[in-house]
Image (tube, rainbow, N blue to C red):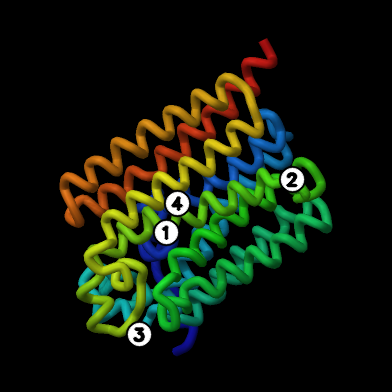
Amino acid sequence: MLFSPVGTCPDWYRLLRIDRPVGYWLLLWPTLWGLLAASGGLPSMKNAVVFVGGVLLMRSAGCVVNDFADRDFDPHVERTKDRPIAAGRISPGAALIGFVLMLAMALLLVVQTSVFVVELAVVGAVLAGCYPFLKRYTHFPQAWLGMAFGWGAVMAWAAETGDVASPIPWLLFAANICWSLSYDTAYALGDREDDLKIGVKSTALWLGEYAVPAIVLLGLLTVALLGVVAFEIGGFWVGIGWWMALMLQLLLCGRLLRCGERWGFTFFLRSHYVGLLFASGFVIQGLSTQF
């Protein structure tokens, strides 16, 4: 049946990737960059709840639609063959119902902001919904993922300031595209054989033997763009946060160059700490103004 089986709680736990929280962090940090940069490190409680809650819902919704889109591919890939939809423990129809419910809850959150932010949220939903299908048509789905994740920074800036006329949210958006191309290409290194077998595309395949240096260059470009933001925003602690992020990115890139492709997945898992360090500079800067 189309809507059966509906799956158990452990099945949904795995479908939503709650057991793999790095995806939540990779969406959360760019969203917080926009929120914290726009508010001087101290966003309104309402916006903080709206955007943190939105991150949790949209990342989970993205995992569901990704597995729905890949339901015919995943059974043929060693890493994904046991995912709940691929293994038949959750039906595609039940998964779609869950996806729609999460979108509805995210909408209930975003309508607490403004009409302008709701309009931006529609764009974000389109970006997120289209992403899983792009690997069939382009070698650069990672760039689209960066746009989908980076759009949170634009929305958060708009929620705090009322517009997106400043170059800062767009610099954050561009930084996240580079960041996603870097860490998600590293992630895709381990899937190249399976991707070739089933006929899907990725930057890891397109770059070939140049994948590792490209990952490094994109990671450094990410931090360079964040440095421009830090300079524009100003503030001692924002600068410290950026320097710490830069140092960590250099360490991660150096290890990737030394160890090669076999360190790609670890590079992916640890990259989100770069975003954490940059965000922490804004938080400390905001708190320092209160004391």
Residue 135 lies left or right of residue 39; in this view the side is left
Alpha carbons under labels 1 and 2: distance apart: 24 Å
In which quadrant of the rendered image does the C terminus lie? top right
> Judging from the image, what secondary structure is the residue with disc 3 in?
loop
Q: Position of residue 274 (x, y in %)?
A: 42, 38
Q: Amino acid at mark 4?
A: Trp
The label shown at residue 179 is 4
Q: Nearer the viewer, mark 3 or mark 2?
A: 2
Q: CA distance from mark 3 to mark 2?
A: 43 Å
Residue that carries the numbered disc 2 in the rendered image = 166
- Give the residue type at disc 1: Leu
Q: Is residue 42 visible?
A: yes
Q: Secondary structure at mark 1?
A: helix
Q: Is residue 260 left or right of residue 25?
A: left
- Taking the spot 33% from the left edge, 49% from the top edge, the residue there is 216
Mark 1 or mark 3, which is nearer to you?
Answer: 1
**Mark 3 to mark 4 CA distance (whole Å):** 29 Å
Residue shown at 53%/64% (left/top)? 61
Q: Is residue 114 left or right of residue 81?
A: right
Residue identifier under label 1: 181
| First of labels 4, 2 by sequence position | 2
- Identity of the residue furthest to the top in this view: 291
